[in-house]
Image: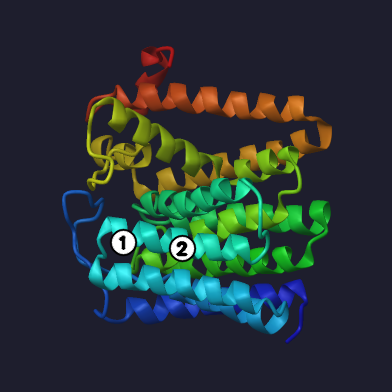
Amino acid sequence: MSSDPLIIAAIGFGLGLAGSFLMSRGAFLLDMPNERSSHSTPTPRGGGAGIVLGFILISAAVIKDFSGAAVGAGVGLLGFFEDRLSLPAPLRLFLQLILALGAVLATRSTGPAILFWVILIAGTANFYNFLDGIDGIAGLTGAVSFSLLAFFSFYIAGMVEAGSVSIALAAGCLGFLPFNFPKARVFMGDAGSMFLGFEFALTVFNLSSSLRSLLCLGMFLCVFYADALLTLFFRWRRNEGLTVSHRGHLYQYLCNELSLPHWAVSASYAFIQLLFGVLSIFAYYRSIVWQLAVIAAFSTAFIIAYRSIKGLSPGQGLGQVANSITPP
Protein backbone atom coordinates (compact mmCIF):
# COMPACT_ATOMS: atom_id res chain seq x y z
CA MET A 1 0.00 0.00 0.00
CA SER A 2 1.29 3.46 -0.92
CA SER A 3 2.73 5.73 1.77
CA ASP A 4 1.69 8.87 -0.12
CA PRO A 5 0.15 11.25 2.48
CA LEU A 6 -2.76 12.04 0.14
CA ILE A 7 -3.62 8.35 -0.23
CA ILE A 8 -3.31 7.84 3.52
CA ALA A 9 -5.62 10.81 4.11
CA ALA A 10 -8.11 9.46 1.59
CA ILE A 11 -8.16 6.05 3.29
CA GLY A 12 -8.57 7.59 6.73
CA PHE A 13 -11.34 9.89 5.54
CA GLY A 14 -13.16 7.13 3.67
CA LEU A 15 -13.13 4.71 6.59
CA GLY A 16 -14.11 7.46 9.04
CA LEU A 17 -17.04 8.36 6.81
CA ALA A 18 -18.07 4.73 6.24
CA GLY A 19 -17.88 3.86 9.94
CA SER A 20 -20.03 6.80 11.01
CA PHE A 21 -22.55 6.11 8.22
CA LEU A 22 -22.91 2.42 9.05
CA MET A 23 -23.23 2.97 12.80
CA SER A 24 -25.80 5.73 12.24
CA ARG A 25 -28.10 3.33 10.36
CA GLY A 26 -28.89 0.90 13.16
CA ALA A 27 -29.75 0.57 16.81
CA PHE A 28 -26.95 -1.86 17.65
CA LEU A 29 -25.43 0.67 20.05
CA LEU A 30 -27.74 3.35 21.39
CA ASP A 31 -26.77 6.18 23.70
CA MET A 32 -29.73 6.66 26.01
CA PRO A 33 -30.08 10.13 27.59
CA ASN A 34 -29.36 10.40 31.32
CA GLU A 35 -28.69 13.11 33.89
CA ARG A 36 -25.18 13.68 32.47
CA SER A 37 -26.26 13.86 28.83
CA SER A 38 -26.40 16.97 26.68
CA HIS A 39 -28.84 15.30 24.28
CA SER A 40 -32.49 14.40 24.80
CA THR A 41 -33.19 11.59 22.32
CA PRO A 42 -31.63 8.10 21.93
CA THR A 43 -28.78 8.34 19.42
CA PRO A 44 -26.60 5.61 17.87
CA ARG A 45 -22.99 5.58 19.03
CA GLY A 46 -19.82 3.79 18.04
CA GLY A 47 -19.34 6.01 14.99
CA GLY A 48 -15.62 6.23 15.73
CA ALA A 49 -15.12 2.61 14.66
CA GLY A 50 -14.06 3.69 11.18
CA ILE A 51 -11.35 5.95 12.64
CA VAL A 52 -9.95 2.98 14.56
CA LEU A 53 -10.02 0.75 11.47
CA GLY A 54 -8.21 3.40 9.44
CA PHE A 55 -5.48 3.60 12.07
CA ILE A 56 -5.06 -0.18 12.19
CA LEU A 57 -4.89 -0.45 8.39
CA ILE A 58 -2.32 2.34 8.00
CA SER A 59 -0.23 1.09 10.95
CA ALA A 60 -0.11 -2.51 9.71
CA ALA A 61 -0.10 -2.14 5.92
CA VAL A 62 1.83 1.11 5.38
CA ILE A 63 4.32 1.65 8.20
CA LYS A 64 4.49 -2.03 9.25
CA ASP A 65 4.03 -1.18 12.93
CA PHE A 66 2.25 -4.37 13.92
CA SER A 67 2.67 -3.83 17.67
CA GLY A 68 1.18 -0.33 17.34
CA ALA A 69 -1.71 -1.73 15.31
CA ALA A 70 -2.30 -4.40 17.96
CA VAL A 71 -2.32 -1.87 20.81
CA GLY A 72 -4.66 0.40 18.85
CA ALA A 73 -6.99 -2.53 18.20
CA GLY A 74 -6.93 -3.35 21.92
CA VAL A 75 -7.86 0.21 22.88
CA GLY A 76 -10.62 0.32 20.28
CA LEU A 77 -11.96 -3.03 21.49
CA LEU A 78 -11.93 -1.82 25.09
CA GLY A 79 -13.90 1.25 24.04
CA PHE A 80 -16.37 -0.95 22.16
CA PHE A 81 -16.98 -3.09 25.25
CA GLU A 82 -17.43 0.10 27.28
CA ASP A 83 -20.01 1.33 24.75
CA ARG A 84 -21.81 -2.01 24.81
CA LEU A 85 -21.48 -3.15 28.43
CA SER A 86 -20.52 -0.09 30.53
CA LEU A 87 -17.54 -1.66 32.29
CA PRO A 88 -16.83 -0.82 35.96
CA ALA A 89 -14.55 2.24 36.16
CA PRO A 90 -11.74 0.45 38.11
CA LEU A 91 -11.62 -2.37 35.55
CA ARG A 92 -11.61 0.06 32.63
CA LEU A 93 -8.77 2.09 34.16
CA PHE A 94 -6.77 -1.06 34.94
CA LEU A 95 -7.04 -2.24 31.32
CA GLN A 96 -6.10 1.22 30.03
CA LEU A 97 -2.99 1.21 32.22
CA ILE A 98 -2.02 -2.27 31.01
CA LEU A 99 -2.39 -1.21 27.37
CA ALA A 100 -0.43 1.99 28.00
CA LEU A 101 2.34 0.06 29.78
CA GLY A 102 2.56 -2.39 26.90
CA ALA A 103 2.81 0.43 24.36
CA VAL A 104 5.53 2.22 26.33
CA LEU A 105 7.58 -0.91 27.03
CA ALA A 106 7.52 -1.78 23.34
CA THR A 107 9.56 1.40 22.73
CA ARG A 108 11.33 2.27 25.98
CA SER A 109 12.22 -0.68 28.20
CA THR A 110 13.68 1.03 31.27
CA GLY A 111 13.71 4.33 33.15
CA PRO A 112 11.69 6.15 35.79
CA ALA A 113 9.83 8.13 33.10
CA ILE A 114 7.81 5.02 32.24
CA LEU A 115 5.35 5.71 35.07
CA PHE A 116 4.85 9.29 33.87
CA TRP A 117 4.08 8.19 30.33
CA VAL A 118 1.76 5.37 31.35
CA ILE A 119 -0.27 7.74 33.53
CA LEU A 120 -0.28 10.43 30.82
CA ILE A 121 -1.48 8.04 28.12
CA ALA A 122 -4.24 6.49 30.24
CA GLY A 123 -5.19 9.90 31.63
CA THR A 124 -5.44 11.47 28.17
CA ALA A 125 -7.62 8.60 26.98
CA ASN A 126 -10.04 9.40 29.80
CA PHE A 127 -9.81 13.18 29.36
CA TYR A 128 -10.68 12.90 25.67
CA ASN A 129 -13.57 10.66 26.59
CA PHE A 130 -14.78 13.18 29.21
CA LEU A 131 -14.74 15.97 26.62
CA ASP A 132 -16.74 13.99 24.06
CA GLY A 133 -20.14 15.15 25.26
CA ILE A 134 -21.60 17.47 22.61
CA ASP A 135 -22.01 17.35 18.85
CA GLY A 136 -18.79 17.83 16.93
CA ILE A 137 -16.36 18.55 19.76
CA ALA A 138 -14.35 15.30 19.61
CA GLY A 139 -14.21 15.20 15.80
CA LEU A 140 -13.26 18.85 15.30
CA THR A 141 -10.64 18.82 18.04
CA GLY A 142 -9.26 15.53 16.77
CA ALA A 143 -8.92 16.91 13.25
CA VAL A 144 -7.03 19.96 14.59
CA SER A 145 -4.84 18.15 17.13
CA PHE A 146 -3.73 15.31 14.86
CA SER A 147 -3.09 17.75 12.00
CA LEU A 148 -0.74 19.64 14.32
CA LEU A 149 0.93 16.35 15.27
CA ALA A 150 1.33 15.51 11.58
CA PHE A 151 3.00 18.87 10.90
CA PHE A 152 5.39 18.39 13.82
CA SER A 153 6.16 14.83 12.74
CA PHE A 154 6.98 15.66 9.13
CA TYR A 155 8.53 19.11 9.33
CA ILE A 156 10.15 19.25 12.77
CA ALA A 157 10.86 15.74 14.03
CA GLY A 158 11.31 14.12 10.63
CA MET A 159 9.34 11.05 11.74
CA VAL A 160 7.37 9.88 8.71
CA GLU A 161 5.69 6.98 10.53
CA ALA A 162 4.18 9.20 13.24
CA GLY A 163 3.17 11.70 10.57
CA SER A 164 1.39 9.05 8.51
CA VAL A 165 -0.59 7.80 11.49
CA SER A 166 -1.49 11.36 12.50
CA ILE A 167 -2.71 12.17 8.97
CA ALA A 168 -4.87 9.03 8.98
CA LEU A 169 -6.43 9.99 12.33
CA ALA A 170 -6.99 13.65 11.39
CA ALA A 171 -8.65 12.58 8.13
CA GLY A 172 -10.70 9.93 9.95
CA CYS A 173 -12.05 12.63 12.28
CA LEU A 174 -13.01 14.74 9.25
CA GLY A 175 -14.77 11.74 7.71
CA PHE A 176 -16.72 11.21 10.92
CA LEU A 177 -17.93 14.83 11.15
CA PRO A 178 -20.65 14.84 8.42
CA PHE A 179 -22.70 12.51 10.63
CA ASN A 180 -21.91 14.30 13.89
CA PHE A 181 -21.69 18.03 13.11
CA PRO A 182 -23.47 20.41 13.31
CA LYS A 183 -26.25 18.00 14.39
CA ALA A 184 -25.32 14.50 15.50
CA ARG A 185 -26.88 11.51 13.80
CA VAL A 186 -24.31 9.27 15.48
CA PHE A 187 -21.93 9.69 18.42
CA MET A 188 -18.26 8.76 18.35
CA GLY A 189 -18.59 6.57 21.43
CA ASP A 190 -15.82 5.40 23.74
CA ALA A 191 -14.51 3.22 20.91
CA GLY A 192 -13.53 6.46 19.18
CA SER A 193 -12.92 9.08 21.85
CA MET A 194 -10.96 6.87 24.27
CA PHE A 195 -8.92 5.62 21.33
CA LEU A 196 -8.13 9.14 20.06
CA GLY A 197 -6.96 10.30 23.48
CA PHE A 198 -4.80 7.22 23.90
CA GLU A 199 -3.20 7.57 20.47
CA PHE A 200 -2.66 11.31 20.88
CA ALA A 201 -0.64 10.80 24.07
CA LEU A 202 1.17 7.79 22.61
CA THR A 203 2.19 9.87 19.58
CA VAL A 204 3.43 12.61 21.92
CA PHE A 205 5.46 9.95 23.71
CA ASN A 206 7.00 8.76 20.44
CA LEU A 207 7.83 12.31 19.28
CA SER A 208 9.12 13.75 22.56
CA SER A 209 12.91 13.94 22.47
CA SER A 210 13.29 16.81 24.94
CA LEU A 211 11.35 18.98 27.39
CA ARG A 212 10.85 21.57 24.65
CA SER A 213 9.23 19.07 22.30
CA LEU A 214 7.04 17.70 25.10
CA LEU A 215 5.81 21.21 26.00
CA CYS A 216 5.06 21.97 22.35
CA LEU A 217 3.25 18.70 21.67
CA GLY A 218 1.21 18.83 24.87
CA MET A 219 -0.23 22.18 23.79
CA PHE A 220 -1.81 20.49 20.76
CA LEU A 221 -4.58 19.26 23.10
CA CYS A 222 -4.39 22.06 25.66
CA VAL A 223 -8.10 22.98 25.62
CA PHE A 224 -9.18 19.44 26.50
CA TYR A 225 -6.47 19.13 29.15
CA ALA A 226 -7.43 22.47 30.70
CA ASP A 227 -11.18 21.77 30.85
CA ALA A 228 -10.66 18.27 32.26
CA LEU A 229 -8.04 19.22 34.87
CA LEU A 230 -9.84 22.34 36.10
CA THR A 231 -13.12 20.47 36.41
CA LEU A 232 -11.45 17.67 38.36
CA PHE A 233 -9.74 20.23 40.62
CA PHE A 234 -12.93 22.11 41.48
CA ARG A 235 -14.87 18.86 41.99
CA TRP A 236 -12.12 17.75 44.39
CA ARG A 237 -12.32 21.09 46.20
CA ARG A 238 -16.08 20.57 46.64
CA ASN A 239 -15.53 17.00 47.91
CA GLU A 240 -17.48 15.55 45.00
CA GLY A 241 -16.80 11.99 43.93
CA LEU A 242 -14.31 12.12 41.06
CA THR A 243 -15.55 8.86 39.55
CA VAL A 244 -19.24 9.86 39.67
CA SER A 245 -20.81 10.82 36.33
CA HIS A 246 -21.49 14.53 35.99
CA ARG A 247 -21.80 17.32 33.47
CA GLY A 248 -19.69 19.95 35.17
CA HIS A 249 -17.20 20.62 32.38
CA LEU A 250 -17.08 24.13 30.96
CA TYR A 251 -18.29 23.04 27.52
CA GLN A 252 -21.28 21.32 29.14
CA TYR A 253 -22.11 24.42 31.19
CA LEU A 254 -22.00 26.53 28.04
CA CYS A 255 -24.46 24.22 26.26
CA ASN A 256 -26.73 23.06 29.08
CA GLU A 257 -26.97 25.99 31.50
CA LEU A 258 -26.24 28.90 29.14
CA SER A 259 -28.04 27.28 26.16
CA LEU A 260 -25.38 27.92 23.54
CA PRO A 261 -25.69 25.68 20.45
CA HIS A 262 -23.44 22.64 20.38
CA TRP A 263 -21.89 23.60 17.05
CA ALA A 264 -20.81 27.02 18.35
CA VAL A 265 -19.12 25.63 21.47
CA SER A 266 -17.42 22.82 19.52
CA ALA A 267 -16.17 25.19 16.83
CA SER A 268 -14.90 27.62 19.48
CA TYR A 269 -12.96 24.88 21.28
CA ALA A 270 -11.42 23.74 17.97
CA PHE A 271 -10.51 27.30 16.95
CA ILE A 272 -8.86 28.03 20.31
CA GLN A 273 -6.99 24.74 20.05
CA LEU A 274 -5.75 25.60 16.56
CA LEU A 275 -4.69 29.10 17.65
CA PHE A 276 -2.64 27.95 20.63
CA GLY A 277 -1.30 24.95 18.76
CA VAL A 278 0.14 27.24 16.09
CA LEU A 279 1.48 29.62 18.76
CA SER A 280 3.10 26.64 20.45
CA ILE A 281 4.94 25.71 17.25
CA PHE A 282 6.01 29.34 16.81
CA ALA A 283 7.35 29.40 20.39
CA TYR A 284 9.15 26.08 19.88
CA TYR A 285 11.25 27.67 17.14
CA ARG A 286 12.20 30.49 19.55
CA SER A 287 13.11 29.20 23.00
CA ILE A 288 11.73 27.49 26.08
CA VAL A 289 11.07 30.94 27.57
CA TRP A 290 8.69 31.68 24.70
CA GLN A 291 7.06 28.28 25.21
CA LEU A 292 6.48 28.91 28.90
CA ALA A 293 5.05 32.33 28.07
CA VAL A 294 2.51 30.79 25.67
CA ILE A 295 1.55 28.14 28.24
CA ALA A 296 1.19 30.77 30.96
CA ALA A 297 -0.93 33.02 28.72
CA PHE A 298 -3.24 30.18 27.75
CA SER A 299 -3.56 28.85 31.31
CA THR A 300 -4.33 32.28 32.78
CA ALA A 301 -6.89 33.09 30.09
CA PHE A 302 -8.60 29.71 30.41
CA ILE A 303 -8.81 29.88 34.22
CA ILE A 304 -10.28 33.39 34.12
CA ALA A 305 -12.79 32.37 31.43
CA TYR A 306 -13.69 29.19 33.32
CA ARG A 307 -14.30 30.99 36.60
CA SER A 308 -16.19 33.85 34.95
CA ILE A 309 -18.45 31.73 32.75
CA LYS A 310 -19.24 29.31 35.56
CA GLY A 311 -20.30 32.39 37.56
CA LEU A 312 -23.05 33.15 35.07
CA SER A 313 -26.53 31.93 35.94
CA PRO A 314 -28.75 30.15 33.41
CA GLY A 315 -30.38 32.75 31.22
CA GLN A 316 -27.46 35.19 31.39
CA GLY A 317 -25.57 35.94 28.21
CA LEU A 318 -21.86 35.61 27.56
CA GLY A 319 -21.79 39.33 26.91
CA GLN A 320 -21.87 39.73 30.68
CA VAL A 321 -18.59 37.85 31.12
CA ALA A 322 -16.57 41.05 30.73
CA ASN A 323 -18.44 42.55 33.68
CA SER A 324 -18.08 39.49 35.87
CA ILE A 325 -14.39 38.63 35.48
CA THR A 326 -12.70 37.90 38.78
CA PRO A 327 -9.10 36.86 39.39
CA PRO A 328 -8.62 33.02 39.37
Which residue is pictured at 59% across the width and 58% down the height?
202
Eyeballing the image, is 207 above or below 324? below
Give the residue type that dot 1 points to: Leu
Give the residue type that dot 2 points to: Ile
Q: How many marks?
A: 2
- Front position in the image: 250 or 206: 206
Picture quarter with the C terminus? top left
- Front position in the image: 14 or 45: 45
Helix, strand or loop under label 2: helix
Which residue is pictured at 37% across the width and 23% down the height?
307
Asked if residue 193 shows in the view, the reply is no
Q: CA distance from mark 1 to mark 2?
A: 11 Å
The answer to which image quadrant residue 103 occupies is: bottom right
Mark 2 crowdedness (10 Å alpha carbons): few <14, some 14-19, many ≥20: some
Which residue is pictured at 59% across the width and 52% down the height?
145
Where residue 183 sits: x, y (%)?
Answer: 35, 60
Question: Badge 2 is on which residue?
Answer: 98
Numbered label attached to residue 91 = 1
